[in-house]
Image: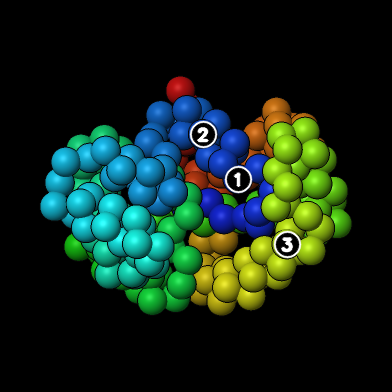
Amino acid sequence: MRLLIMGPPGAGKGTQAKLIAEHYGIPAISTGDMFRAMKTADTPLAQQVREIMNSGGYVSDEITNQIVAERLAQSDCDAGFLLDGYPRTTAQVNTLDAVLDKRGTPLDVVLSLLADEDAVVARLLKRAETEGRADDNEETIRVRQHVYAEQTAPLLDVYRSRELLVEVDGLGEIDEVSERVFTALDSAVGGRDGSPVTRN
């Protein structure tokens, strides 16, 4: 199963991504995790990324695309993968299309976690209070929500037009959301090719 997961900050995307990956026996590929791993990796690309990050610069689409392409070429992705945090722009969507087309491994499903903004803001404010995150105030949280909505709406429209988009309510207890997600994914993938979905 080849998946992409999307959702606003605070919707539990990271948590669900790990559970989905474990459930279906596929690697969860997070661009954030990959950038963090490059702080200690000994490769020319990792060194280039470190220099950019240390100088406070922005890692370009070109470099991000290369990092993701190299990760998808690894053998553990042969049976499937879950992308988290990529693509973020329509240009990255086109690049991902090209990479997957070359491999003959198109996406099966794009999962979008839905979450009411007020409910997410309340959740994040509670987390900020618990974890002492002074920078997570209501204003900054709402700005991030609006930026996500503006930047990802075009991507969701692209995948909706391809009939790949599956939307699931992301609010509720973790297990409750997971069960909704698994049911939706099984139905979407099984329904497209008529074959059952294998669960681990």
What is the number of callouts on the image?
3
Q: Which mark is residue 13?
A: 1
| Residue 187, percent from left and from top | 58, 44
Q: Is residue 175 left or right of residue 92?
A: right
Can residue 86 be seen from the camera position used here? Answer: yes
The reply to whether dot 2 and dot 3 touch (C-beta < 8 Å) is no
Point out the image quarter for the N terminus: top left
What kind of element bears circle 3? helix
Pointer 3: what residue? 140
Is residue 179 left or right of 83 when viewed as pictured?
A: right
| Residue drawn where x is 29% and y is 45% of the image | 38
Residue 66 placement: quadrant? bottom left
Amino acid on which disc 1 is placed: Lys
What's the CA distance linking mark 2 and mark 3?
Answer: 26 Å
The residue positioned 22% from the left and 40% from the top of the image is 41
- Which mark sits nearer the N-terminus, 2 or 3? 2
Q: Earlier in the sequence, mark 1 or mark 2?
A: 1
| Rendering coords of residue 53 (x, y %) | 36, 57
> Which label lies toward us, 2 or 3?
3
Mark 1: few/some/many CA within 10 Å (<14, 14-19, 20+) = many
Q: Which mark is residue 62?
A: none
**Amino acid, disc 3:** Thr
42 or 17: nearer the eye?
42
In space, the residues marked 1 and 3 are separated at their CA atoms by 19 Å
Helix, strand or loop at mark 2: helix
Residue hosting label 2: 18
Label 2, residues with CA under 10 Å away: few <14, some 14-19, many ≥20: some
